[in-house]
Amino acid sequence: MKKKIEKQWKQFQKRIKKLYDDFRKNPKKTTLTLINSGLEIVKNNVLFFIFIVTNVFIGILLRYFTIHTVENLLSIKPILADLAIVLFLGGISFSLKEKNRFPYLLVVSIILTIICIFNSVYFTFYTSFISVSLIVTARYAVEVGDSITNLLKVQDFFYIISPILLTASYFYLKKKNRMTFADKEKRSVSKMITTFIGAGITLVLFLITLTPKDIGRYANQWNREYIVMSFGVYAYQANDIVKSIEPQLTSLFGYDKALKTFTEYYSDRSDEQTWKNQYTGIFEGKNILVIHYESMQNSNIGLTFNGQEVTPNLNRLVKDSIYFSNFYSQVSGGTSSDTEFTFNTSLMPTNSGTVFVSYFNREYVSTPLLLRDKGYYTFSMHGNNGSFWNRNAMHETLGYERFFSKNDYEIDEVIGLGLSDRSFYRQSLEKLKEINEKNQPYYGTLITLTNHTPFDDIDKYGEFDVTLKKNVYNEETGEYEEVVYPYMDGTKMGNYFKSVHYADAALGEFIDNLEKEGILDNTVLIIYGDHDARLPKTDYRRLFNYDPETNSIKNCTSEDPECVVIDSNTYELLRKVPLLIYSKETKEKLHQEVTNVMGMYDVMPTLGNMFGFYNKYQLGHDIFNIQDDNIVVFPNGNWVTNKIYYNSQNESWLPLKETEISADYIKECTDYAGKLLNASNSTIVFDLIKKQRETEESESDYIEEKVIDGIE
Ligand code: GP9
Ligand code: MN
């Protein structure tokens, strides 16, 4: 075989040289010969070219259907990347015997089609691209989210055009007797080399279009949407597979670099809290009840339909709480579990896999663990099965001594994904009464479930009208009549509001019962939305720019002062969730609205200052210490401050106040975000908190020995 390749390589070089000489002698004739031989090549390798064209095409289709912008459709960068990969994969077919080429091309086409379909369906649910490390949790996504039928759209099936066209062409050519294998045993090494050279040239053309930032992002697997937009889905998935295997092989990859990143990031970090303010220690020793409020968005607060409040109980609570109205979750593909993690550790979700599933066996400094050191009893409650998001394992890692899950509840009322909030709260109250009797002080987290996508159990949420009713003057009767316009009825967002109204009523009942049972006498209630409900942009446009006369969305622009522009950046601002701290003290005197921007990673430092615990690895800040200078970093590298929302994928930003924004400011914040995410990822993936503890312990043992030696 080797000799054969060398011989064919020599023949190939001779041909290229001859071609070059002919071109110099007679460029026109040579070009024509080239075109004819090119057509000849296509004619003799139809299947190969159909394989190339269809698999590049479905890659373009995936980008268009998911990231929805025409410039993505025509962006040359990902097309070159896809073409290089598909040429290389196609070129391998020439190294096979002729009779084996079609089966090989078909299998590769099916694999590339599956990559497109999986990503297309996953994007519908998570507005992101799938990571093989999440395959382990994919069933969670299906169980908790929309069932697959809800997720699948017609466009998800477009991708099968690739294997179908290839197969149809094969049988067509066979029928026309054009797929006659002259020599079934023949391999075409020269064609393979030519194709590989074509793939190499395409790859070089692609690489020269890349910026250092592109390369950095690809290496970090930081920003899935950005990578697919720039590198195509095949290169994204290949990188994702490497990144997903990495956690299992961490000891072989980049440990030293990660340790350096970690050491530098925390080098000037004190072991104790170094600041004080008017909230320092105000709740020390009190019980803490946390409500992880599924998909509760901040935009629900104060919203009404025909005078009916969507969240009457939350609206009442915010007036008696320390209410953080400019608060963002910071989730990646782990959604609820990412929030539970960041809330309790002030670290960020990992850039591949999810902490709860891939890194549950790492060591963390968490709120439950720190409070247990202060004598707290720690527990969590959730009506779903305990294996979901691997909570049975990860809640133990986080330091919850008891995790009450589905088996601890009577599943007597099911709405949406499982046990209804009303029943969950009712049954949890009985457990809380006992804990309140025997285990003070305690730290407990209740994770709700009902208000979860796809919000389609509308017969069980109870009545909540999301139409628009108006009194319209009737010329004929000379009277005013009530006219009902559909407005949000029948939309996903309309169903969401019905679900939210149910969840709010259940929460209101629960808090009234906590008050009645005296449980709030010595307890601080923390309520937060775990992430947004991933509602369609069109529903927001309908909500804000509805034209009842035509029952449609006004086609308005930012020039129109009435128009609420919903684009990719303003959409991100709508993903805010509420955070409330509610207690006797806030009711009496501490109630206020905090409007400084804040993220989920700031909660632990803020609560630590109030309850007297501190985590030297926290990435967030005590909001009452940092105030107006805060920055919230998102897992994809985007960030927000009180001044702007910055989209790192397309380097656009949204000004949030009248102020000069310098390039230095953007660079400084973007660098800060990059360092923070890298430090967080290194800490988690390489288990560096444990490493640091072991190093400190061995150092203190060593010093102890020295002291003892000195004394003896
Ligand atoms: C699953 C529930 C919802 O038990 O917490 O999880 P999510 O889909 O929001 O991550
Ligand atoms: Mn959730």
Image: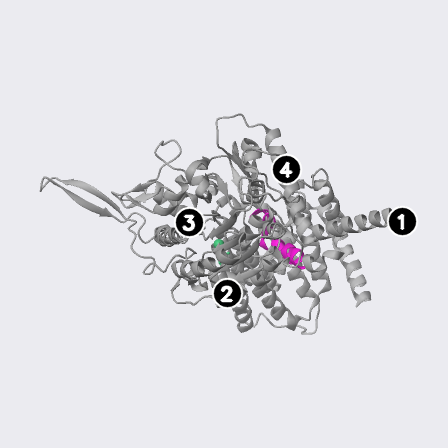
Dots 3 and 4: beta carbons under 8 Å? no
Q: Range of the magenta residues?
A: 223-245
Measured from the top left, where is residue 710 in percent x and y?
A: 89, 46
Q: Residue 243: within the magenta? A: yes
Quarter occupied by residue 419:
bottom left
Q: Amino acid at mark 2?
A: Asn
Dots 2 and 3: beta carbons under 8 Å? no
Is residue 288 visible in this depiction of the protein? yes
Measured from the top left, where is residue 378 in percent x and y?
A: 56, 55
- Report the residue marked by disc 2: 385
Mark nearer the viewer, 1 or 2: 1
Q: Specify which label sits upstream in the sequence, 4 or 2.
A: 2
Q: Which mark is residue 536?
A: 3
Specify few, some or many for label 2: CA neighbours under 10 Å numbering under 14, 14-19, or 20 or more: some
Measured from the top left, where is residue 107 in percent x and y?
A: 60, 68
Mark 1 element type = helix
Specify few, some or many for label 1: CA neighbours under 10 Å numbering under 14, 14-19, or 20 or more: few
Q: Which mark is residue 709?
A: 1
Q: Amino acid at mark 1?
A: Asp
Depth order, front residue of 15/160: 160
